[in-house]
Image: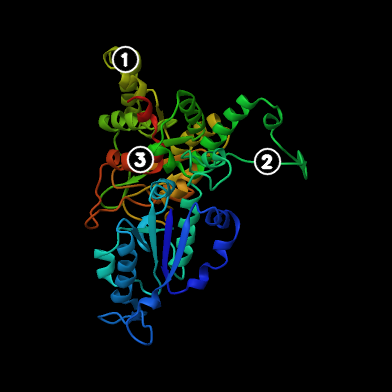
Amino acid sequence: MQIDIITIFPEYFETPLKVGLLKKAIHKRLIGINIYNLRDFAEDKHKTIDDEPFGGGEGMVFKPEPLYKAISYIKNKDPSAWIIYLSPQGEILNQKIAERLSKKNHIVFICGRYEGIDERIRQYFIDEEISIGDYVVFGGEVASLVLIETIVRLIPEVVGKKDSVEKESFSSGLLKYPCYTRPREFMGYKVPEILLSGNHLEIEKYRRKKSLEITLKKKPYLLKDLDFSEEDRKILVEFLSLQKIYLFLVHYPVLNKRGEKIASAITNLDLHDLSRLARTYGLKGLYIVQPLEDQRILAEQLIDYWLNKKGAQYNPLRKEAIKLIRIFEDLESAILEVEKIERERPILIATDASPKRKYIKYEEVRRFLWEKPIVLVLGTAWGLDEEILDKCDYFLEPIWGRLDFYNHLSVRSAASILIDRILGIYSFFKKFSL
């Protein structure tokens, strides 16, 4: 593979290319690397490569002429050269991109600086833009080194053991399992016994399980495009079962349109739709908080119909959902029931269509999922009364409208969106049913 780098700081690469496996790969002629100083392609005696942006503003922009001449010089020698601009606007680098690029014969990296490059070069003379992450560095030089190392190590014979490349983080699509070395015990911390057993089949199973666990907890989005075995599915279900989330639907105290404290009525649709939501996403329970005795009796009758009478035979799938419903007279009783089941008090997270408190984001809720039981508390009518909000530990970010501030959703719709934003990233079952 041939790699060319266009930069205004050629000296930046002097040491990195002379150490480790990159040095060996160059020495073995597995790769060739040329560094081009952009100033050598400038057209004036001062070697000017940048200028002020049209329209004003801070910073400088790389001029189009030197970049065009540098690209043309390389393209004239090899028309197949693949031109990559290292830019914050590019697709974020991942292992699949690295694998694709490792099959190219000739790659050219353009290292931007300052405010970037002239848009005409970006639009008409670049094949691809790549970013190494959503953050800012001084220039593209460091990004080009990241890509070079990521790509080159995938070229055959660069890394001594092919197995080392295949089993590291991201190559299998998973994060790597934990690694240990001597001594067996350090400051009282011991190496897992399975790794000392000599049973290589069991060790491989252990490592696969740990990789799945670590990926699931730290970067679950990596799992969405992977193919899993039946054994993998069992492992994922085992870990996902550790997430304990409940949905509470509160009918008192809630507010009416005038902001007055009221008790709202239970609706048939809420019970059916929210229980199906709970069953689909693997929630531990749908708990209804209703102080009015006649309302509780009606709800219990409906539940009994679907669990023990004609409804159970007519629609067994609905029975699977309805059995998650429990009716409670007040919020504290529902919380105590969760405590009894989980043997610890859950984290209570309130929701509302408008931000009544400082709110947390869905990513934070996902972190809680691996630590403690969670209760998502939803209100009926015109929302939860302050009395309920005061009992909750956190307030979840509302669902915002896409075009304006309108977000007047039914509690069923809101619950579905909220649960999917929290748990949807863990929905892998489709892979096993196709």
Q: Secondary structure at mark 3?
A: helix
Residue 153 pos. (x, y %): 51, 49
| Between marks 3 and 2 in the image, the one whose residue lies nearer the viewer | 2
How packed is label 2: few (under 14 Cα within 10 Å), some, or many (20 or more)? few
Dots 1, 3 in contact, CB < 8 A = no
Callout 3 amino acid: Asp
Whether residue 153 can be seen here: yes
The label number, if any, that marks residue 312 in the structure image: 1
Q: Earlier in the sequence, mark 1 or mark 3?
A: 1
Q: Judging from the image, what secondary structure is the residue with disc 2 in? A: loop
Q: CA distance from mark 2 to mark 1?
A: 53 Å
Q: Label 1 to label 3, Cα distance in Å?
A: 27 Å
Q: Are marks 2 and 1 in contact (CB under 8 Å)?
A: no
Please, is residue 133 above or below residue 156 in the view?
below
Q: Which mark is residue 180?
A: 2
Q: Which residue is mark 3?
A: 420
Residue drawn 40% across and 43% down? 422
Compared to residue 428, the image places residue 123 above or below, namely: below
User: Where in the figure is residue 414, as x and y percent of width and height?
Assistant: 30, 43
Depth check: give the residue in front, 125 or 31: 31
Which of pointers 2 and 1 lies earlier in the amino acid sequence?
2
| Amino acid under disc 2 | Tyr
Please identify the quadrant where the C terminus is shown: top left
Residue at the spot x=31%, y=72% of the render?
A: 69
User: Closer to the camera, 34 or 12?
Assistant: 34
Amino acid type of the residue tagged 1 in the rendering: Ala
Name which residue lies at 44% across and 63% down. 135
Check disc 1 and report its element: helix, strand or loop: helix
Question: Marks 3 and 2: CB-CB under 8 Å?
Answer: no
Q: Is residue 281 left or right of residue 158?
A: left
